[in-house]
Each structure stands twice: as C-alpha cells, then as structure tokens.
C-alpha cells in the first residue's frame, strides 16, 4: 500500500513501478525476543497469582515487550524501497520521515547478493553504485531482490529513450536513433553534450 506521503514525493509524470520491503525474516528476528519475553512474563504472573494475590497492575508489565514489538512492526512497515520510472527511493521513519533517493541516470552499477537461505526464501542485498556524492546505497535483506533489480535496470534503459523522445520502432536500430538524436540536437531540443553522451551510450550497445 502506498501512503499519501510517498505519493506527494513523486514528480510530474513520475510513476511507481515497484514497491518492496525488507523480508519478513527481518521483522521476525526483531520481535522474536519480545514475543518470548511477553510469554514468560504472562506465565510468571499467572503462576505468582495462584500462590500470592497480585494486583491487576502486575499485568501492565506485559505492555513493555508488547509496545516494543509494536514499535518494531511499525518501523518495518514504514521502511519501503521503491522503483519509479526516474529513481530508486528508500523511505523510512514512523513520524519523522527519512528519504534517500538515487536518480536512475546516475546509477553506474547494481550488485545483488543472495545467500543459500536467501535463494530459498527469496531475499537478498541490493547494492546500488552511483555517480552522486552518496556513492553507494545498500538495501539489505529486501524481499524479491531479483525482481527489484530487474525493474530498476529496465526503468533505467527506458529512461534513455524517454529522455530523447525516440520512437519505439527505432529501439533496435541504433544508427537511426543516432540520426534522430542529431536532428534533435540541430533543432536545439537537446544540447551538444547530451547528444554526445547519448550517442556514446548507444554505440556501446552495438
């Protein structure tokens, strides 16, 4: 589910392609101890009540692990990794929001790492190397990392065509695409530097 805060961060004509979170293993590991503590406290209070009358306020002790568990659940739910047609965004924070994004144009390389159990349960780490000052974004133990990486790379490839308004029929015809870029450059729609950059990118695909 995409909340209004995330929608408000989108630019004009920006579309969300994929939303994911850290794998549920991450949440389970965070709340496992709190579940055990809550269970032990409840059992201890019940046993103590049988032998010694206890005030009902003793059961308030259970609220400590339960509130901690609720906090961990909210943290997990509010940490989202999003791929749009322009960038990759990480949202986190329950009340105070933290937003880290990487423009697809600045993405140089993507590395995905999956352990043995990661392949079985479908989670892994995705490392995004960019040309920005941030350098590297590491998304740890996200669910369905293969789909996330594929969506990001597909969006990056399409961004090059959308940015120059190239016809879809020319996508497999690199010389025609370069010629069309040249026409756009002559008309002043794109700069000479942009033309040379796009030309270089297309020639690398031949």
Image: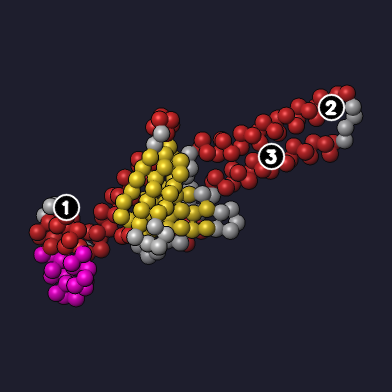
Residue 105 x %, y %: 31, 60
Crowding at dot 2, Cα within 10 Å, few <14 / some 14-19 / many 20+, comes out as few
Residue 40 x %, y %: 73, 29
Name the residue: 12% across, 52% down.
Answer: 206
Q: By what rule are the colours in the image chosen?
A: secondary structure
- State which region is magenta: 179-197
- Please, is residue 57 above or below residue 84 in the view? above
Circle 1 residue: 205
Q: What is the magenta segment's predominant secondary structure?
A: helix
Q: Is-magenta flag for residue 39?
A: no
Separation of residues labelled 2 and 3 (CA atoms): 20 Å
Name the residue: 42% across, 53% down.
Answer: 137
Secondary structure state at the residue bearing disc 2: helix
- Horizontal side of 110 relative to 73 (left or right) equals left
Circle 2 residue: 48
- Horizontal side of 11 relative to 39 (left or right) equals left
Name the residue: 19% across, 58% down.
Answer: 201
Residue 179 x %, y %: 10, 64
Crowding at dot 1, Cα within 10 Å, few <14 / some 14-19 / many 20+, comes out as few
- Horizontal side of 195 relative to 48 (left or right) equals left
Separation of residues labelled 1 and 3 (CA atoms): 55 Å
Residue 187 x %, y %: 16, 75
- Horizontal side of 111 relative to 197 (left or right) equals right
Farthest-out residue, right: 53
Q: Is-magenta flag for residue 188?
A: yes
Q: Are marks 2 and 3 in contact (CB under 8 Å)?
A: no
Secondary structure state at the residue bearing disc 3: helix
- Determine which of the numbered discs, if any, sits on residue 66 in the image: 3
Crowding at dot 3, Cα within 10 Å, few <14 / some 14-19 / many 20+, comes out as some
Query: First in sequence: mark 1 or mark 3?
Result: 3
């Amino acid at each position: 589910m995409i909340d209004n805060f995330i929608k408000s961060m989108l630019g004009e004509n920006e579309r969300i392609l994929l939303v994911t979170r850290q794998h549920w293993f991450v949440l389970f590991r965070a709340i496992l101890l709190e579940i055990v503590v809550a269970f032990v406290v409840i059992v201890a209070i019940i046993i103590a009540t049988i032998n010694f009358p206890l005030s009902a306020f003793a059961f308030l002790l259970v609220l400590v692990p339960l509130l901690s568990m609720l906090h961990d659940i909210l943290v997990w739910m509010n940490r989202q990794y999003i791929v749009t047609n322009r960038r990759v965004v990480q949202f986190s924070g329950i009340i105070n929001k933290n937003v880290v994004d990487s423009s697809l144009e600045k993405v140089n390389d993507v590395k995905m790492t999956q352990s043995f159990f990661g392949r079985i349960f479908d989670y892994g780490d995705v490392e995004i190397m960019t040309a920005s000052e941030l350098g590297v974004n590491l998304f740890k133990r996200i669910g369905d990392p293969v789909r996330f990486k594929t969506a990001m790379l597909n969006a990056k490839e399409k961004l090059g065509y959308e940015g120059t308004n190239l016809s879809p029929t020319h996508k497999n015809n690199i010389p025609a695409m370069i010629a069309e870029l040249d026409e756009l450059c002559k008309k002043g729609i794109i700069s000479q530097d942009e033309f040379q950059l796009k030309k270089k990118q297309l020639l690398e695909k031949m």
